[in-house]
Amino acid sequence: MSNRLSPTKLSAVRSSRSKSILIAGGAGFVGSHLADRLIEQGHTVTVLDDFTTGRADNVAHLVGRRRFRLVRGDVIDPIEFEVDQIYNLACPASPPHYQLDPIRTFKTSVLGALNTLDLAERSGARILLASTSEIYGDPEVHPQPETYWGHVNAFGPRSCYDEGKRSAETLFHDYHERRNVDIRVARIFNTYGPRMRPDDGRVVSNFVVQALKGEDITIYGDGSQTRSFCYVDDLVDGLMRLMNTADLHTPVNIGNTGEFTIAELAETVVDLVGTRSRVVYRDLPVDDPRQRRPDISKAQRELGWSPRISLRDGLVPTIAYFDQLLQRMPAEMAS
Ligand SMILES: NC(=O)c1ccc[n+]([C@@H]2O[C@H](COP(=O)([O-])OP(=O)(O)OC[C@H]3O[C@@H](n4cnc5c(N)ncnc54)[C@H](O)[C@@H]3O)[C@@H](O)[C@H]2O)c1
């Protein structure tokens, strides 16, 4: 791994067979699975990551491969690179992480969008933004189609993330309209799978880790709030299809339409882990949405994409991953 450079200066060999692809935030949960798939397809992949929430472990198996490079860098700084495609995934995604330093989260979203868009413009690359269902806020329309403008609080603890991503979308829109940059915008709904962090505070990792440790499973609120859960392989497939579909410059929802209450998720995890954990209830955090489910008809129509992995099927490898991780981790880190 090289040291952090400012501005980040990189170079890549382009070839007709393989594309040179930058994944900003590629050492994170989603980015590392994307890197695996792109390398499998014979592309040259550079992961640029500042390791705030990502881990070198997630891509350690790729280090040393001829077509893979890992660079420590920050999307808040300008990036110099020759590249055919850019996936901009750089941003902490879980509330405890993005709320740790909300100003930095906002900068990462907005300046990260600017710097990756500038890079795309300079190098003539196609660029995809990992946006989020959070741009719909606490929605008043169910399920949420891309045409819904959202119900978002600009002045609260989640705003750095929600408004940061909304601003990033605006920049993507304007770089396309005014500078003809070839953009793609994926609005990603809750995704889970191996390589999530045990401490990231997201509901699937929380429940699985608590169940594996035999601890109480904590539900915030009464458990009747609903979420949809997309397995990471399905998401990566959707992102790659979106990137490689011609002339699709408007946002596309990517998520699983199966809607589960949080209480149902807890029951499924308890059942699959076979734990004796009890379910306990705590106060709902501020601005926590009641219900969230994507309308994915656009992805089905334009990308021929639908999720294929059921919640139970996706939970099995996820539980196996956390089980192994907890066995390897020192007790104080796993707690
Ligand atoms: N996982 C989900 O359910 C979900 C849902 C909606 C949107 N998304 C979006 O998808 C992307 C990936 O999410 P994830 O779940 O893999 O999260 P993650 O936190 O595991 O990955 C984010 C990666 O970005 C890196 N990063 C953060 N700030 C950076 C900076 N300033 N410069 C360079 N790298 C930086 C982190 O170190 C990490 O590797 C994020 O942009 C997130 O907003 C994810």
Image: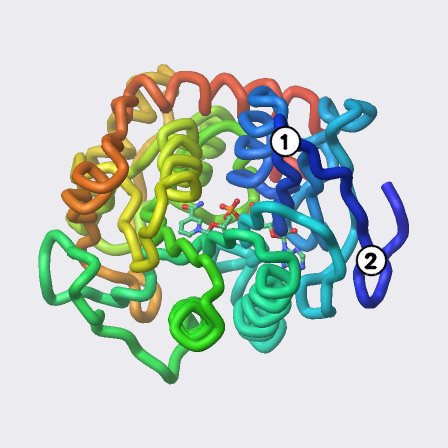
Residue 321 in the image, given as x and y percentages of width and height:
54, 22
Q: Is residue 58 left or right of residue 94?
A: right
For marks 1 and 2, give the one nearer the viewer: 1
Q: Quadrant of the N terminus?
A: top right
The residue beneath circle 2 is 9
Residue drawn at x 71%, y 38% as measured from the top left: 14
Residue type at the position of mark 2: Lys
Residue drawn at x 45%, y 30% as measured from the top left: 193
Residue type at the position of mark 1: Ser
Q: Can you tell which quarter of the image residue 216 is in? A: top left
Q: Give the vertical position of 202 relative to 155 (above or below).
A: above
Q: Is residue 154 left or right of residue 44?
A: left
Q: Dot 2: few (<14), some (14–19), or many (≥20) neighbours within 10 Å?
A: some
Q: Quadrant of the C terminus?
A: top right
Could you tell which of marks 1 and 2 lies nearer the N-terminus?
2
The residue beneath circle 1 is 16
Residue 46 in the image, given as x and y percentages of width and height:
71, 41
Is label 1 in a helix, a strand or a loop? Answer: loop
Q: Along the line of sight, which residue is nearer the eye, 335 or 101?
A: 101
Residue 126 in the image, given as x and y percentages of width and height:
51, 52
Q: Confirm whether residue 63 shows in the render.
A: yes
